[in-house]
Image (cartoon, rainbow, N blue to C red):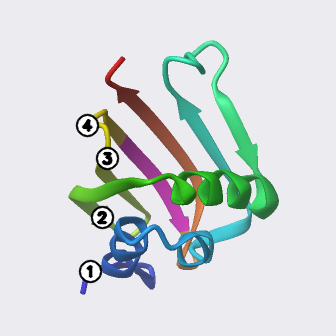
Amino acid sequence: MTTTKTLDVTSLARAIETRDAAAQLAVYASDAELTVVDHDNPPSRPRVLRGADEIGAYVADVCAREMTHEVRATVADAGGIAFQVACRYGDGTQVLCLCVADIEDGRITRQQTVQAWDS
């Protein structure tokens, strides 16, 4: 088991791969901030989600999609985590997400995600 300041990275990866929205949301601080950069949300206008309600709705939406998720290349230290998630929809469309997050008291307080997908 890999942990960082009591965040169980192995459990987080399992929650992502099994599309368990509740388990994923449980690792975020109540006042966390999640920034997403992608084709629809470029660096000059990223999607910024704040707090459990906004982040929870986003995570629930992603988890509800019929796709697979594979967590790869996880790196963690006492204050943060970085990981890659390779996703695939049933029609073969692929998505690659790179995430970097700050950890305080065992919870994600700030996360930045960059994602790209087949078009």
Q: Amino acid at mark 1?
A: Thr
Q: Which residues are magenta?
A: 98-103
Quadrant where the C terminus is found in the figure = top left
Query: Marks 1 and 3: CB-CB under 8 Å?
Result: no
Q: Is residue 28 magenta?
A: no
Residue, disc 2: 76
Looking at the image, the residue that sits furthest to the left is 73
Disc 4 to disc 3, C-alpha distance = 10 Å
Q: Which is more N-terminal, label 2 or label 1?
A: 1
Residue, disc 1: 2
**Residue shown at 63% from the left, 52% from the top:** 61
Q: Which is more N-terminal, label 3 or label 4?
A: 3
Secondary structure beneath dot 1 equals loop
Q: Amino acid at mark 2?
A: Ala
Looking at the image, the residue that sits furthest to the front is 91
Secondary structure beneath dot 4 equals loop
Indicate the quadrant where residue 71 lies: bottom left
Q: Which mark is residue 87?
A: 3
Secondary structure beneath dot 2 equals strand
From the viewer's perspective, tell me whether residue 59 is left or right of residue 102.
right
Q: Which is more N-terminal, label 2 or label 4?
A: 2
Residue, disc 4: 92
Q: Nearer the viewer, residue 68 or 44?
A: 68
